[in-house]
Image (spheres, rainbow, N blue to C red):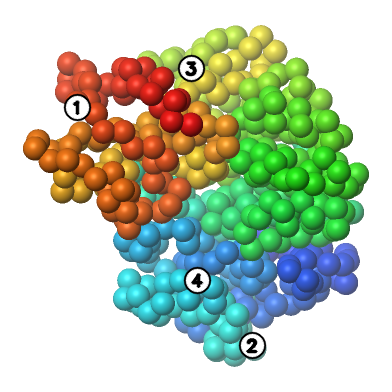
């Protein structure tokens, strides 16, 4: 294997290369504090050695519960250099949900920010893993002097991102150094970033997009990343002007909230070259608002298992192809398949299958789930797409029932399970319906137990106790019964059609 080629496919080398090139350049701006490339490289190397000196071995997982923080950036590069796997967990989840994920990941270490320590307190679910605080962890680890960093192969795991499927059962998508290299290389060939760029990062670091859609590429190229703990539209709009941001990534909800800010029409966006949209297609009316401000819009499509970049509609084509996600990135192959697995030739519709070096090797310790979605190197996305005569793709629906609300994946079966666990609910079904603000929103249809009057407010409190807030349906409708197919399954198409007008009237 060519050593130079192998090295550039190792994420740990990216920050070292940028530090050697521009050591005093600011790599991260975070709430008034800055971290240079030299500081980021040195801190990540020291942390890598301390982690190994403290007993961790290559392949171990380091789980985190934290809002976006520079310490987590140091950690991802430390893991990259030490052969460890970063498993950033969604801190919006309920403790019962986190318990399931932690049992899946089996982390050798669990780190929380101060804010998350205050949020979760001394809960025994987390206590099992001896959680430590991000801001003080380095001082608590063993001295790493004299520790040799291991040799790492590009196929070694780097990121373990939690995801689910139609069953709602959590799975961990394991992304390797090579997956991250190829998805960032393809991104750079279509939506290039250079050392002069200033990237605003508002996507959470527990999402694959929080790493592989701009941030890691920015650090590889020597750009500056303005890192925000969470997304606040008023502050983000100010930062676009004050920090002279040149590009950013977000979901439609982010851009809608920015466009609804009172100062949006007069904000200085003169340095903002382009914005990248993912998670769902940006509505044409919203894209037009950004076009009117002189900002180019690129529409992306991807999924965690593809690390995530699959297709992109470049700014020059978005205005003429509203609702489309464009063509495959370089090094990515896309095929449309019929229900029988046959290729759809030319223009047509079918399930989107994806192949390329960006596609993950599989789910963490779950061969059955992996075999369900990976066939002869092809990844079944579960999304139904239509291809036009020019090779552009449009996502039409999902073979899976998962929907995306505000950039977060919601799996109806998981919500339905919590609904039917409530004593007074006899049956339940959840649908995702279009929503101007969130992209999609959840609507729950519930059948009360016979002779019981259902208290919807109490039911909503039950949901909030057992589910993350973004999973709680925005609308709960009490119905007499749920339509079913001849096989006894809930007929959600009929259900949605029957109540569509009623759902729309509520908003």
Residue 381 in view, yes or no: no
Residue 442 in view, yes or no: yes
User: Which residue matches tag 1?
Assistant: 480
Q: Residue at x 54, y 88 (%)?
A: 140
Select label 4 or label 2 by which is in front. Answer: 4
User: Which residue matches tag 3?
Assistant: 350
- Looking at the image, residue 313 lies above or below residue 225: above
Select label 1 or label 3 by which is in front. Answer: 1
Between the C-alphas of marks 4 and 2, the distance is 33 Å
Helix, strand or loop at mark 2: loop
Side of 404 relative to 291 (left or right): left
Give the image location of residue 151, x and y in percent: 61, 67
Select label 3 or label 2 by which is in front. Answer: 3
Q: Residue at x 48, y 76 (%)?
A: 118
User: Which residue matches tag 4?
Assistant: 116
Q: Point out the tag, 3 or 4, that comes first from the N-terminus.
A: 4
User: Which residue matches tag 2?
Assistant: 146
């Amino acid at each position: 294997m060519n050593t130079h080629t192998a090295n550039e496919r190792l994420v740990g080398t990216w920050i070292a290369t940028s530090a050697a090139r521009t050591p005093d350049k600011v790599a991260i701006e975070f709430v008034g504090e800055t971290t240079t490339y030299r500081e980021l490289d040195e801190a990540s190397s020291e942390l890598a050695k301390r982690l190994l000196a403290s007993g961790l071995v290559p392949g171990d997982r380091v789980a985190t519960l934290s809002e976006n923080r520079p310490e987590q950036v140091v950690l991802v590069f430390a893991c990259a250099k030490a052969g460890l796997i970063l498993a950033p967990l969604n801190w919006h989840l309920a403790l019962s949900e986190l318990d399931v994920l932690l049992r899946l990941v089996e982390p050798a270490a669990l780190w929380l920010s101060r804010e998350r320590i205050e949020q979760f307190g001394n809960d025994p679910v987390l206590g099992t893993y001896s959680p430590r605080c991000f801001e003080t962890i380095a001082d608590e680890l063993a001295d790493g002097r004299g520790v040799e960093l291991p040799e790492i192969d590009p196929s070694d795991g780097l990121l373990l991102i939690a995801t689910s499927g139609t069953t709602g059962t959590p799975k961990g998508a394991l992304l390797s150094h090579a997956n991250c290299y190829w998805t960032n290389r393809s991104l750079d060939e279509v939506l290039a970033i250079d050392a002069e760029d200033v990237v605003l990062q508002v996507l959470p670091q527990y999402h694959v997009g929080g790493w592989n859609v701009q941030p890691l590429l920015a650090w590889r190229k020597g750009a500056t990343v303005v890192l925000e703990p969470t997304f606040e539209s008023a502050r983000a709009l100010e930062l676009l002007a004050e920090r002279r941001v040149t590009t950013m990534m977000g979901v439609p909800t982010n851009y809608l909230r920015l466009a609804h800010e009172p100062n949006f029409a007069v904000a200085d966006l003169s340095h903002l070259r382009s914005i990248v949209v993912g998670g769902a297609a940006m509505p044409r009316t919203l894209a037009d608002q950004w076009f009117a401000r002189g900002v180019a819009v690129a529409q992306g499509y991807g999924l965690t298992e593809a690390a995530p970049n699959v297709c992109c509609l470049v700014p020059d084509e978005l205005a003429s192809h509203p609702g489309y996600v464009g063509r495959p990135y370089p090094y990515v192959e896309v095929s449309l398949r019929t229900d029988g697995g046959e290729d759809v030739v030319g223009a047509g519709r079918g399930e989107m299958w994806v192949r390329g070096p960006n596609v993950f090797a599989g789910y963490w310790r779950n061969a059955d789930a992996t075999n369900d979605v990976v066939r002869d190197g092809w990844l079944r996305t579960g999304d139904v797409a239509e291809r036009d005569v020019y090779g552009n793709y449009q996502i039409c629906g999902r073979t899976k029932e998962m929907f995306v609300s505000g950039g977060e994946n919601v799996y109806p079966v998981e919500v339905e399970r919590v609904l039917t666990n409530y004593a007074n609910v006899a049956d339940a079904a959840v649908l995702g319906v279009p929503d101007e603000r969130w992209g999609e929103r959840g609507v729950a249809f519930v059948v009360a137990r016979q002779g019981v009057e259902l208290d919807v407010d109490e039911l909503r409190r039950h949901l909030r106790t057992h589910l993350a807030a973004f999973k709680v349906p925005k609308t709960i409708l009490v119905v007499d019964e749920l339509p079913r197919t001849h096989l006894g399954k809930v007929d959600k198409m009929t259900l949605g059609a029957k109540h569509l007008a009623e759902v729309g009237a509520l908003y």
